[in-house]
Image (spheres, helix red, strand yellow):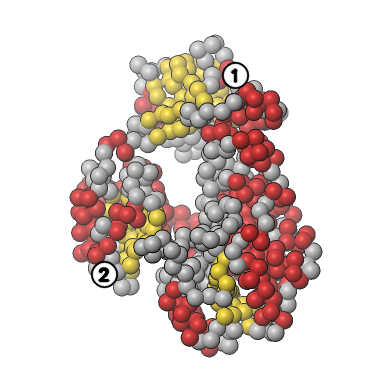
Amino acid sequence: MTSKWMVYAKKADFDGLARRFGITPVTARIIRNRDVCGEAEFGRYLYGTRKDLYSPHLLKDADKAADILLEKIAAGRRIRIVGDYDIDGVCSTYLLHTALTRLGAEVDYEIPDRIRDGYGINEQIIAAAAADGVDTVLTCDNGISAVSQMEYARQHGMTVVITDHHDIPRDADGNDILPWAAAIVNPKQSDCTYPWKEICGAVVAYKLIRILYERAGVPMSEWEEMLEFAAVATVGDVMRLQDENRIIVKEGLKQIPRTKSIGLRMLVEKNNLDIYNLSAYHIGFVIGPCLNAGGRLQTAKLALRLLLSRDEAEADELARELKLLNDQRKDMTARGLEQAVCQVEEHFRNDKVLVVYLPDCHESLAGIIAGRIRERYNKPAFVITRSEDGVKGSGRSIEAYHMFEALCQVKELFTRFGGHPMAAGLSMASEEDVERLRRRLNEKAELTEEDFIPKIWIDAPMPMDYVTEDLIRELELLEPFGNGNAKPQFAQKGLRIRSARVLGKNRNAVRLALVTPGGTPMEAMAFTDGDAFLAEMGESRVMDAVYYPTVSEYNGNRTIQAVVKEWRFQG
C-alpha cells in the first residue's frame, strides 16, 4: 500500500532544551514531537518518578469512597467487587480484592461473562449479590453508564461505590448523566479536578487503595508494591503513554522483577521472557493477550485466579492454560483474518467502509480481526458474527472516520450499539441486516481516496552516518514506547543497496547491506515478507528508508544496525 511520509514540524528551542537537559537536539525534537511542551514537562518526561504521580485526593469522591469502604469493613458488611473481563478489569479486580482482603474485609468478586452477560454490571449480577447477602457493590472498570442497573441495586437496599474511567454520557445541556451511587470515582466527571483524565480503571483502583491504606495505617511500601498491575493494565488497555501514565508504566516495569504475584511470574516464565528485561511491547503483545485470552474464550476468572494464586503448582497450571488459550486464540484469529481478506478481495475491495460477515467466528475475536483488516487496507472495518439473539459486531476505524457518529446515522438498524471515534460495537436482529448495514454505511461515508493513504510520521530526516551508540543509548531514555509515545523514526534518501538476503524459516526478514550517500556502510534489517520485498525491489539498487537505529550483538561484536520500517525503491 502506498503511504505518505510526513515530517513533524513542531517548534521549540531544541538547542536550548538540549543544553538544559544534557541531551542532543535530535532527542529534544523527538520529545517535543510527543506533545511535550516546556521545561517542567520535559523534565518530568525524562526523569519523572513515583514522587511525580498525582495525589489520589484530587479524584472526586475518592475520599468518600474510602470512608464508605472502611466503615463497611469495620461493621463486617459483605462487599462484592464487580469487574470486567479484559486485562484492565482483571487487574482492577485483583488490586481491590488484594487491598480489601489486607484490610480484613469480607469480600469476594464477580466478573461478567463476555458472551452471556456482555460488558459491565447487569441486573442478574445485582440480584445474585442481593441473594447472597451482599451489602456493598464495588465496581471497577465499569459502572459509569449503568443507570438502570444501579437503580435496581438501590431498590434492593444496597450500597454502591463505582470506580471507572470510561467516558460519561451527557445530556443535551452537557451535564453528566450519572447512575445512582454512594460514591463515584471517575476522572472523566465534569467537576473532577484530577489533572490527567486518561488513566485506566486499574489506576483509578490503585489511587483509591492509597487512600484506604493511608486511613488504615498500612505502610505505603505495600501500596507501592502493587504498582506493576497498574502498569500492566495501562499498557494492556492501550492507554496513552503520556503524562502520569508514562511514569506508571516506566516504574511498574522496574517493579515486575520484584513482584509478589507468583501468577505473574509464572506467566512470564511460560512465555519464555526474561523478567528482568520486560518492555511495554512484551506486556502489550505477549503477557496482556494471555491475560485477555481467558475472558475471550472461557472466563476472565482464570486470569484473576492466576494473579491471586498463592500456590506455585496452581499458578503454574493456570499460566500454562492461559498460554494455551492464547495460542488457540491466535490460530482462530489467523483463520478468521484469512476468511475476511478473501471476502474483501472478492466482493468489497472498492468499498469505503468494509463490512465482513463471519458467522462462525468467535464473537470475542471480531474486534481483533476488524483491527487487522483496518491495518491491511487502511479503511474503517467491521466484523460481524452470529450470536444467540441475532448478530454482533465490532469495528475499528481510521483518523478520517468518526465511527460512533457514523453508527448514529443508521442507529435504527441496531438493537444496541456504542463506541467512540476509533472503535465501536453493535448488535442487530438478524443476518439480513448485515448487507443493509454495509450498503447504508457506504452510502453515507464521505471518505476520499486521500483518506485511505496511511501517513508515516518521521521525527527527523537524519542521515544514518550520524547514528552512534551514544545516540542509541540516549534514545532509550524515551522508553517505554507505545500508544502516544511511539518509537522514534528517522528517514534518509538515496541509500545504495549492496546486497539483500532473505532470512528465517518463514522467510520473513531481509538483511541489507547499505551505503549512505556520504559513503558510510550500514547494516540494516527489514522484517517483512522477504520474497515480496525482493520482488518489489526488482533491479533497483537505490532506496529511501524510514528507520530506527539499534545495536546488534553477535559473538561479542557490537554493530550499529538500522531497522527499516518503510521503504521506497528508486528507478
Residue 392 location, x and y as percent?
33, 64
Image spot of residue 89 (x, y percent) = 55, 64
| Residue at x 47%, y 72% (from the top left corner) | 179
Q: How many marks?
A: 2
Mark 2 element type: loop
Does 550 sit above or below residue 148? above
Disc nearer the start of the sequence (2/1): 2
Report the amino acid beneath label 2.
Ala
Q: Residue furthest front?
A: 173
Residue 466: which numbered mark, if any?
A: 1
Report the residue marked by disc 2: 429
Q: Secondary structure at mark 1?
A: helix
How far from the left and from the top, in percent, is residue 516? 52, 15
Along the line of sight, which residue is nearer the eye, 243 or 431? 243
The quarter of the picture where residue 218 lies is bottom right
Asked if residue 131 is positioned above or below residue 456 in the image, the reply reads below
